[in-house]
């Protein structure tokens, strides 16, 4: 399956909310505040999946040895994906993350 990249003109308020989607727990704000904008909802759903992954990674710290490794790798991956998501928003695009994007569409 190929990654989907959509591009369109986005207003300042929609762009601001979409950027918030990739800032941890702030992903819930655009999810609730702008239900009518499919662009914002797309990014908000991906942000929610990333945030859930981050929370899960914190809980894996309770698992000796393997948990710390999973947490470190997950932290790096989530940071990279968040930066890519913010850049995607700033460019006015909607890039569907591999795997995460599929999970996000199910929300």
Image (spheres, grey):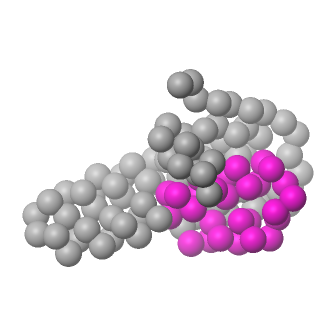
- The image position of residue 76, as x and y in percent, is 36, 52
Res 87 → quadrant: top right
User: Among all residues in the image, which is located at the extreme left?
Assistant: 65
Q: Would residue 92 be seen by someone viewing this image from the given angle?
A: yes
Q: Is residue 85 left or right of residue 54?
A: right
- Please name the residue shown 63% across and 48% down the image: 105
Question: Residue 7, relative to residue 54: is it above or below?
Answer: above
Is 4 above or below relative to 44?
above
Q: Give residue 72's position: percent from left, percent from top.
A: 27, 58
Q: Nearer the viewer, residue 42 or 83?
A: 42
Q: Is residue 27 magenta?
A: yes
Is 33 on the left-hand or right-hand side of 86? right
Q: Which residues are magenta?
A: 25-51
Please name the predominant secondary structure of the magenta segment in the image: helix
Q: Position of residue 21 (x, y in %)?
A: 64, 60
- At x 63% / y 66%, what residue is drawn? 27
Q: Quadrant of residue 24?
A: bottom right
What number of labels is visible? 0
- Tell which residue pokes out farthest to the front in this image: 106
84 on left or right of 76:
right
Q: Could you tell me which quadrant the C terminus lies in? A: bottom right
Q: Residue at x 76, y 54 (%)?
A: 40
At horizontal 53% and vertical 49% (from top left) the residue drawn is: 103
Q: Is residue 47 magenta?
A: yes
Horizontally, is 65 left or right of 86 in the view?
left
> Is there any visible trace of residue 22 in the rendered image?
no
């Amino acid at each position: 399956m190929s990654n989907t990249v959509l591009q369109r003109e986005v207003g300042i308020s929609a762009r601001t909310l979409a950027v918030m989607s990739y800032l941890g727990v702030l992903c819930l704000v655009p999810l609730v505040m702008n239900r009518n904008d499919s662009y914002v909802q797309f990014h908000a759903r991906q942000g929610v999946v990333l945030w859930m992954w981050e929370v899960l990674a914190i809980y894996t710290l309770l698992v000796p040895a393997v948990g710390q490794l999973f947490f470190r790798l997950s932290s790096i991956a989530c940071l990279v994906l968040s930066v890519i998501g913010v850049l995607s928003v700033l460019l006015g695009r909607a890039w569907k993350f591999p795997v995460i994007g599929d999970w996000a569409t199910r929300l």
